[in-house]
Amino acid sequence: MRRETAYKLAGRKHDHPVTGSGLEKEREIRFAAYPPGQADRAFEALRILKGVFVRRGVRDDSVVVRYSVLDYSLELIEEALTDAGYHLDSNLYSKLVRALVYFCEETQRHNLLSPERLIKKSNEVYITVYDQHPHGDHDDTPPELREYK
């Protein structure tokens, strides 16, 4: 039996996203010191994206972006900036934080797109399917004739 069939028989609903599950992300993007003025140019460039809200960071070389993890990811935004010629901060701390954020967002997106797992009532699904299909254990003899008295 296909997994989707089992989920439907168990009455599972697949309406994602779940409200209040932390879909809105706010991340700081730091730029390298050279060439100067990258944060200002990136601020203007990122304002064009629909669904991405940008504000200036606390530091002069950073911008803060807010987005839904269903529409964007930090990896996607930073790749677009890198492809456009921006140089991101490349110290060890920034690389570690970046890798951790990439992994967390990718995992969250994967979990949101996958159907819910059957935890309870999974045996009822297979019982229902078993009863609906013909199999060799069915006996057409009436119950009163099956018993020996």
Image (spheres, rainbow, N blue to C red):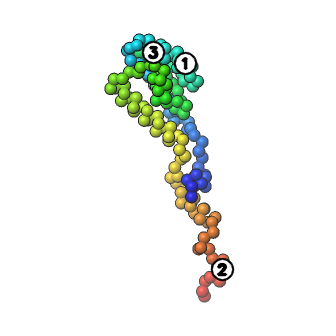
Separation of residues labelled 3 and 2 (CA atoms): 82 Å
| Occupied quadrant, residue 134 | bottom right
Task: Name the mark on residue 141.
Answer: 2
- Nearest-to-viewer mark from 3 and 2: 3
Q: Which residue of the protein is positioned furthest toward the bottom in this rendering?
A: 149
- Where does label 1 land, which residue? 47
* Secondary element at tag 2: loop
Task: Name the mark on residue 39.
Answer: 3
* Secondary element at tag 3: helix
Amino acid tagged 1? Arg
Amino acid tagged 2? Thr
Q: Mark yes or no: residue 54 visible.
A: yes
Residue nearer the viewer, 27 or 94: 94
**Relative side of 40 to 11, left or right:** left
**Relative side of 13 to 82, left or right:** right
- Total marks placed: 3
Looking at the image, which residue is at 52% across and 27% down?
A: 67
Q: Earlier in the sequence, mark 3 or mark 2?
A: 3
| Crowd rating for badge 3 (residues with CA inside 10 Å; few <14, some 14–19, many 20+) | many
Asked if 127 appears above or below 141 in the picture, the reply is: above
Quadrant occupied by the C terminus: bottom right
Residue nearer the viewer, 23 or 113: 113
Looking at the image, which residue is at 46% across and 29% down?
A: 75
Q: Earlier in the sequence, mark 1 or mark 2?
A: 1
Looking at the image, which residue is at 52% across and 32% down?
A: 69
| Crowd rating for badge 1 (residues with CA inside 10 Å; few <14, some 14–19, many 20+) | some
